[in-house]
Amino acid sequence: MTTSTHSFPQGFVWGAATAAYQIEGAWNEDGKGESIWDRFSHTPGKVMDDANGDVACDHYHRYQEDVELMRSLGLKAYRLSVSWPRVLPNGIAPANPKGIAFYDRLIDALLNAGIEPFITLYHWDLPVALQDRGGWGNRDVAGWFADYAALMVRALGDRVRYWITLNEPWCVAFLGHDLGVHAPGIRDRRLALQVVHNTLLSHGAAVQAIRAAGDAQTQVGITLNFQPNLPATDDPADQAAADSALDSLYEWFAHPILRGYYSDRVLRYAGPDAPTIRAGDMSLISARNDFLGVNYYTVSFYRAVDGKAEQVELPGLEYTLMNWAVVPRGLTMVLHRLSRDSHGRLPLYITENGCSYLDQVGPDGRIHDAKRVEYLRAHFAAAQQAIQEGVDVRGYFVWSLMDNFEWAWGYRQWFGVVAVDYATQKRTIKESGYYLRDVIAANAVL
Ligand code: FCB
């Protein structure tokens, strides 16, 4: 095959992603307020090993070194998130100038290194002060979030063009409020479904606020996670099982955003727990986005068992340390579906994709993470295929730039293309990091 069949479009945005709570540390420095993840991780029994993000990768103090690392990998872009309680300790005004100054320095360092920042405003660290007022369960959150968004665009919008409102609101609603495995650790399905609606409303309100505070260059979107349901075999009964299983990620989020209403199926599933919706909500939720961020890691397989859909693992398939099946074609499928559902009019960015494995340091002192290289290669190829087939994919952010605090898993998962020794904070580029560097330089799957 010639190189061109493996090439990405000119100007393709290659990057890596992180999130504030997972890397920054400095959890109570320079006037930062407490977040729900500070509170949750400080509660015994919530996070593996009772680990927390108090220090994490100490990025707050080492951001210059980290930007240098990004430069050495040739990243064109970097997706970071802002810690809401760092800039607004109480969630609402007054702002904390020192908190804003940190992001100001970080953005300047990125731009000096020729790296385009993509900012996520909410990657799961709500100010505790707002949780105490009902958090995402309180409809007022839409106003609080829009004000916070406007503050950040006023502070950084002269240099930052790309704004992502929320990251994976499915996780906020269901992991945080239904399963209770993420902060704020609540188990209340009815509340979780109201949180679905309130996160979507908050997105819509923030889109308006960001456009009002921004300029003609400003681009705003949201990042959703996708995990499509696939049949375990090519037996039509398994296909029917996969089709019958609710795709709660798609139907609660992409569907209302792209179509302006919740599907009958999802409302039937919700029954009496369905969220309260007010007049005007759905048009706010489905207002035009400039792009959509796509997080993709894996799929769910279903089999028909006694006429019911049962989720199964497939023996013989590669599974990562998260026990997520490696299925690159799932990414191609997701990209095609989103392109169809938006009539090809919504530019897509893959805002997260990657894998966790326990990496070995070789006798040469290097980290030969061959499985991660394989994972990335196969998923780059899957995205490239969708692009060749006409899908408008503009960029690809690997999760993650470096090993970090993996939420309820603490430090027991390793997603980075750069290793972090948490005792010394030493960063070591893994083989996958060098591979990413070469892919970016070639702008092609290697
Ligand atoms: C996503 C999150 C990200 C990271 C990866 C592994 O759901 O957005 O912060 O935890 O999974």
Image: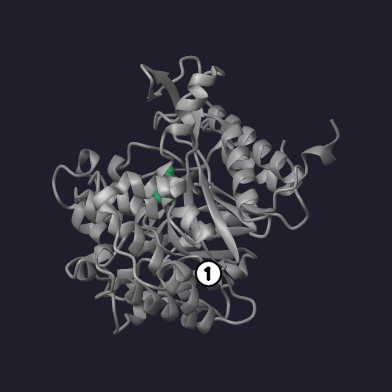
Residue 61 falls in which quadrant of the image? bottom left
Q: Residue at x 74, y 58 (%)?
A: 11
Q: Is residue 393 left or right of residue 202?
A: right
Q: Is residue 177 visible?
A: no
Task: Residue 399: give x, y in percent of width and height.
Answer: 50, 46
Q: Nearer the viewer, residue 315 or 438?
A: 315
**In the image, farthest residue toward the left:** 44
Quarter holding the C terminus?
top right
Colour convention of the picture: one colour
Q: Tag 1: residue type?
A: Ala
**Residue 3 as seen in the image, left or right of residue 185:** right
Quadrant of the snapshot with the N terminus: top right
Residue 16 placement (x, y as % from top left) = 55, 52
Q: Residue at x 46, y 66 (%)?
A: 285
Near mark 1 (Cα within 10 A), the count class, few <14, some 14-19 or many ≥20, is: some
Q: Where does label 1 land, which residue? A: 287
Residue 377 x, y percent position in the rendering: 64, 34
Vertical side of 11 occupied by 308: above or below: above
- Evaluate whether residue 206 shows in this view: yes
Q: Nearer the viewer, residue 411 or 280?
A: 280
Residue depicted at x 48% and y 83%:
154
In the figure, 61 relative to 434: above or below?
Answer: below
